[in-house]
Amino acid sequence: MAQVTRSGDFDIYATFQQFLQDDQISPPLAAILSLAEAIVMSNAGTMFELVQALNDGAEELKRRSPNPISLNAGCELFIAFVTLFPHESDNFAELKKELEQQGRKYATEAISFRDKIAELTLGFIKDDSVILTHSYSRVVLKALLHAHKTKRISVYVTESRPRGLGLKTYEALTAAGIPCTVVLDSAVAYVMDRVDFVLVGSEAVVESGGLINYVGSNQMAIIAKAANKPFYALAESYKFHRLFPLSQYDLPTHNPNILSFTTPITRSAGQDAASSDAAQEATATSQASQGTSSSATERAMTQEQIAKNPGVDYTRPDLISLVFSDVGILTPEGVSQYLVGMFAG
């Protein structure tokens, strides 16, 4: 596990980013490790002050992260643990050290949760299964690689624009010898009849049993439901989140800029013609330097256009067949019951 470099001026978000440099560490675990580090760096002399410092640290992480959903699940879990932790020591410094060690121990053990989920998923993967997955997920990748050891499987993976994370999944699967094809995000309905089931990861599983994941997961679930194909979500228990969105617009990542309309700039005919000529000339120059023709040119969204689109979406629980987790195979309703017990102490 990556070690953080300590300095006199503790920056919890910089610490969070350092932990994320380890590819095995997901945002919730990085958040737990960052809060554990914050305990050591804190001047708190009472439990009240310590919990306040942790809450402030969690708020700082959420404020500075473009997508705080999954890290917030980790923050909630760790702060609840600290609050409920039985302590009898008269030495508060020793208690703080123990809490930090417990946080690090949990994060280390939590990496193995993916192995448990992969083993549970194996029982639902038959020989010669054709599986559709979305984007890139560490736990899904672990499950597919584990299944490949004993069964013949083939995988379709969506491209997952604009970040193209599906290509990362494709590279990992083909390197392991698993037949894999990348499909366009817009071709999910086209390919659905050829798959046996859908397997996706998660940013978070919320109180309703619904799923928050990379954008495109919701439409994949809707199409799977219409085609009577099972839709399975894989999620480590530290991604179970006390959040209850009713629609896409209730997500913490939604803001007024997403899906907003751009006001057209009115220009004269002369300006339009000059602008068009200049654009064509620039395109031709670029193509000439790259040795390409106009027929081979692909249009791409600008960063401004990408910023107007969501990065994650919400999938309703009625569209999800089962949730595979390190605590067992749950129905969406079972997730709600587990969350109640987890935070009730």
Image (cartoon, helix red, strand yellow):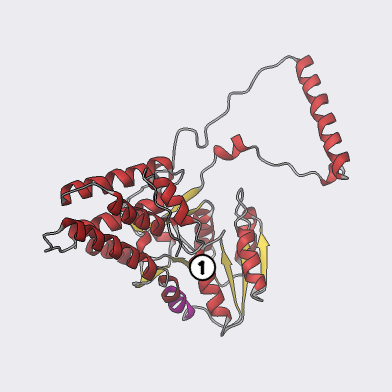
Residue 247 in view, yes or no: no
Classify the position of the C terminus by image quarter: bottom left
User: How far across and down, in percent of the image, does residue 94 sit?
Assistant: 20, 61
Residue at 20% x, 56% y: name it: 93
| 119 part of magenta stretch | yes
User: How far across and down, in percent of the image, does residue 302 sit?
Assistant: 65, 37
User: How far across and down, in percent of the image, does residue 213 sit?
Assistant: 47, 55
Relative to 194, is 326 on the left or the right?
A: left
- Characterize the magenta stretch by its predominant secondary structure: helix
Amino acid type of disc 1? Answer: Val
Classify the position of the N terminus by image quarter: bottom left
Residue at 34% x, 64% y: name it: 104
Which of the 4 image quarters holds residue 167?
A: bottom right
Residue tagged by mark 1? 140
In front of the other: 328 or 282: 282
User: How far across and down, in percent of the image, does residue 288 sit?
Assistant: 88, 39
In front of the other: 130 or 202: 202
Bounds of the magenta span?
117-122
Q: Is residue 70 above or below residue 228?
A: above
Relative to 240, is 47 on the left or the right?
A: left
| 289 part of magenta stretch | no
Residue 49 in view, yes or no: yes
Q: Residue furthest front?
A: 8
